[in-house]
Image: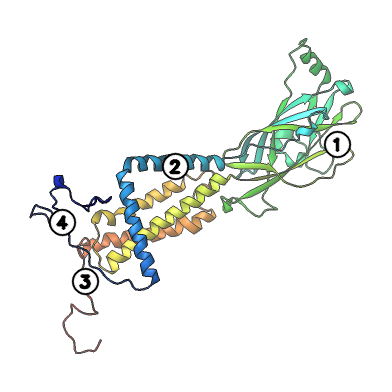
Amino acid sequence: MQDSPLPYQGTDKHAGVDEKGNFKNAKIAQVEEPESYEVNGRWEAMWLELKFKYDIVYHYLKLHAPLVCATVLALVITASIAIGWRFRLRVFNIADPDSFDNAIVQMSANLVDIDPIGQEMTLDWNINYDCDPIGCPDVNVFFDANTLRSTSFGSQMPSNVKPDPIFTINGGNVLAARNNSDRRPSSLTFRTDVAITNGPTQRTLQSYPYDKYITRLVFFAEQVATNESVSIAIVDTTGIAVGFNAQLQNITEIPDDFGTVTKNIEVTRGAVVRVYAIFVVLVVWFVTLTFMATCVMNVFFGKGISAGVLVLPVGTLFAFTQLRSTLPGAPEGFGAIIDFLGILPCLAILTFCSVCMTAVFLWRDPERDIPRWHWREPGEGRRKSSYNV
């Protein structure tokens, strides 16, 4: 007799099966031959063929179960790392590397923090004063004072006049430090708290994780003695504000006559933050709808369900609030759109399910089907009535 690749066909003298494929032990129930029936239609034939192929594939996968499990684990780990790396936060980048050889005042910026509540962005600046072409005079660096928080520029009254300098470069001290003759002067570094706003975007913190902010950096440099313009540029930027992407907007600025540098910056939540927030909302809804369907089947239709399942919604009420607290940078408490679309309605539904699935213990045993569940016709188990149904 020809051997079959399937384990349940053919003969096996070691398994107690005779040449007809029946078990020799009378206590083991014999498997009857499947009844043959005529296939009706093309779609039914395709469905039967699909099920047959599934049985074959399942059988061979089961034979190599350890290898299949190892392969699935490797694929899951690789895909998870690749997706996480793809959606990672981007490094702050608003630099003009091409201006490195042309600018006298070369500035490097490091993004420290972004505060969506106070609507400000903290930047650390480092200056490289390449002053040899102009003889190293003293230079003032100016920023638009109205875009800086008060802690950054002192007590200047807001106006649209030329701002006071935010930093002064002493050319003599730069030369002394470069020649190692005097290292007492302070370093060429300073910090600014730049204002960001959601006014033009209309996407406030309530729109989390799709809130958006913009800001505009305007700066220039002049010689202290003559007020003559000095070329200035941002030649390098770095830093990441956790949870945010700060990138340069694609806006072409027309240069003026004084070498003023303008940078339009857009601040948004990172893609990984958005994906995680949407994932949490979907999970909350899937769990809520599952418990709601369980409540309807048990409480209203009388389908018996294990008591351990019936009390799960009570614990899930507290789990949802904990899950919501894991959203990075979300507003404290409730108030974001994701709360109104996800957390709050799901909490209300779960509260209703918890009350119903707990109170059902007062009237009957919820682990057993009620008789009406097994009725095949309306009123099958009731006494006959003179009223027509």
Q: CA distance from mark 3 to mark 2?
A: 45 Å
Marks 4 and 2, the one that precedes in the sequence: 4
Q: Amino acid at mark 2?
A: Leu
Marks 2 and 1, the one that precedes in the sequence: 2
Q: Where is residue 123 drawn, in percent x and y?
A: 67, 34
Mark 4 surroundings: few (<14), some (14-19) or many (≥20) residues within 10 A: few
User: In terms of secondary structure, where does tag 3 sit?
Assistant: helix
Residue 20 — which label?
4
Front label number (4 vs 2): 4
Would you name the residue on which mark 2 appears?
A: 75
Q: Residue sitting at 58 percent across and 44 percent down?
A: 270
Q: Where is residue 150 drawn, in percent x and y?
A: 71, 37
Q: Amino acid at mark 4?
A: Lys
Marks 3 and 4, the one that precedes in the sequence: 4
Residue 259 — which label?
1
User: In terms of secondary structure, where does tag 1 sit?
Assistant: loop
Classify 74 as above or below 308: above
Q: CA distance from mark 1 to mark 3?
A: 85 Å
Q: CA distance from mark 3 to mark 4?
A: 41 Å
Q: Is residue 108 left or right of residue 40?
A: right
Front label number (4 vs 1): 4
Q: Amino acid at mark 3?
A: His
Marks 1 and 3, the one that precedes in the sequence: 1
Of 234 and 102, nearer the camera is 102
Would you name the residue on which mark 3 appears?
A: 374
Q: Amino acid at mark 1?
A: Gly
Q: Is residue 339 left or right of residue 63?
A: right
